[in-house]
Amino acid sequence: MPTQERAVVTRASIVQGAAVVFDERGYANASLDLIAEQANVTRGALYFHFKAKDALANAVIEEQHRISRSYAEHALTEARSALEGMIRMSAGLARQLTTEVVVSAGIRLTTDGTASELSAKDPYRDWMDTFVTLIGLAIEQGDFRDDVDPVRVAGFIIPAYTGVQLVSDTLHDRADLFERVSDLWSLLLPGLVRPERLADATALLTLVAP
Amino acid sequence: MPTQERAVVTRASIVQGAAVVFDERGYANASLDLIAEQANVTRGALYFHFKAKDALANAVIEEQHRISRSYAEHALTEARSALEGMIRMSAGLARQLTTEVVVSAGIRLTTDGTASELSAKDPYRDWMDTFVTLIGLAIEQGDFRDDVDPVRVAGFIIPAYTGVQLVSDTLHDRADLFERVSDLWSLLLPGLVRPERLADATALLTLVAP
């Protein structure tokens, strides 16, 4: 492989190894030595790409957000409405959280107490912006009532989802995550959806499954 | 002071000092030396009470939960209904989060990525149990609909509140916390409250203020 290509591969395996270590041990108990060992690279190779633990954690968060965004865009192309898109996105993230270590680690780092030094703000803002747009569309498409405020609703759904997955992780290692995400929607929909559309909207919750 | 009494005072000032350090720096970046300095005790005195950082963090979480529980019980005595009690409790915790360092630190430690080694599970379970009871009462008192499921609703409200305060902390240092807690209720109440009681229930949200 040419040198530059090899560097890209090495960097990717370091980020993957870092995700495994952060996911298992949390930010505080992860070390560069453990990550080098997990990624099967020398300490020197690791240092060439990342000078410190916070840079590695930020790379995991960025890679997680990139993966999650790309799934989300795919979910939207499959959806027949903005509401279906939002429900598919929430289910897709739950699937990634329970099957992909980079996503699990990235979200754990985002909600970590040491978040002040990590790039935790951007993903929240990015999801909120996306949901403001989709909620606006759901109003236009007649699923949501006209008096729904997209900014306030997005400003609740993203944090609520954050807490739901965090507490599911803390109490049950995410074993009940799909059930809890489905509850989030079934409790919120009556306040958002036009009464005549509520049955159809609730039927979409079968999409929230592994 | 008698020896035992002095030990109690010393322990309390260590927990207070630990809260200040954990709150400012997070679990990962706190050290026993910094905590001893902040608490104005010798390293030996600190070691007499706490052998390791996780024991100190657990003591802060326990003290936070004790303070928050005692406020919550007071909120309930002032409330004229179970629903008003839940709204007062959520506002009371927001007040403590923005004014009491032990509460802020305790909640930050509970949602910390290193939570696996800390006693983070018990507070969630304790709040959920309390809310299951209060939601049951709100149904009996005719505020909530008969088909509301107390376990599922409590299993959403506690995680949702957790996420709301966490994201408010991450994005805005909790400056918008009361507004976000009020949004939590105003978005959930339509799915829970009997239509003829919804206006009265929504009026209770004026209680969610600093």
Image (tube, coloured by chain):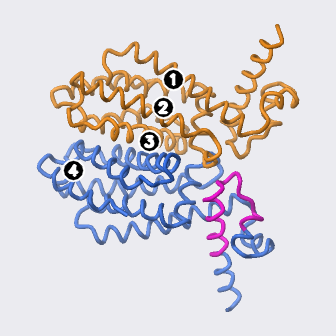
Chain colours: A blue, B orange
Circle 1 SS class:
helix
Circle 4 SS class:
loop
- Disc 3 versus disc 4: nearer the observer: 3
Q: Which residue is the site of mark 4? A: A144
User: In the displayed structure, would residue A160 be above or below residue A34?
Assistant: above
Question: Where is residue A8, by image quadrant?
Answer: bottom right
Q: Which residue is the site of mark 1? A: B69
Measured in 3D between alpha carbons, the distance from the residue under mark 3 to the one under mark 4, in whole angstroms, is 24 Å
State which tag comes first along the sequence, 3 or 1: 1
User: The residue under label 2 is which amino acid type?
Assistant: Asp
| Position of residue A149 measured from the top left corner of the image (x, y, whole percent) | 29, 44
User: In the displayed structure, would residue B180 be above or below residue A80?
Assistant: above
Give the residue drawn at x 61%, y 32%.
B61
Q: Which residue is the site of mark 2? A: B126
User: The residue under label 3 is which amino acid type?
Assistant: Pro
Counting other residues with Cα less than 10 Å from the Cα at mark 1, is it few (<14), some (14-19), or many (20 or more)? some
Q: Which residue is the site of mark 3? A: B159
Question: Where is residue A70, by image quadrant?
Answer: bottom left
Badge 3 and badge 4 both on one subunit: no
User: The residue under label 4 is which amino acid type?
Assistant: Phe
> With A144 as the anchor, is B132 left or right in this view?
right
Which disc, if any, is residue A122? none
Chain ID, mark 2: B
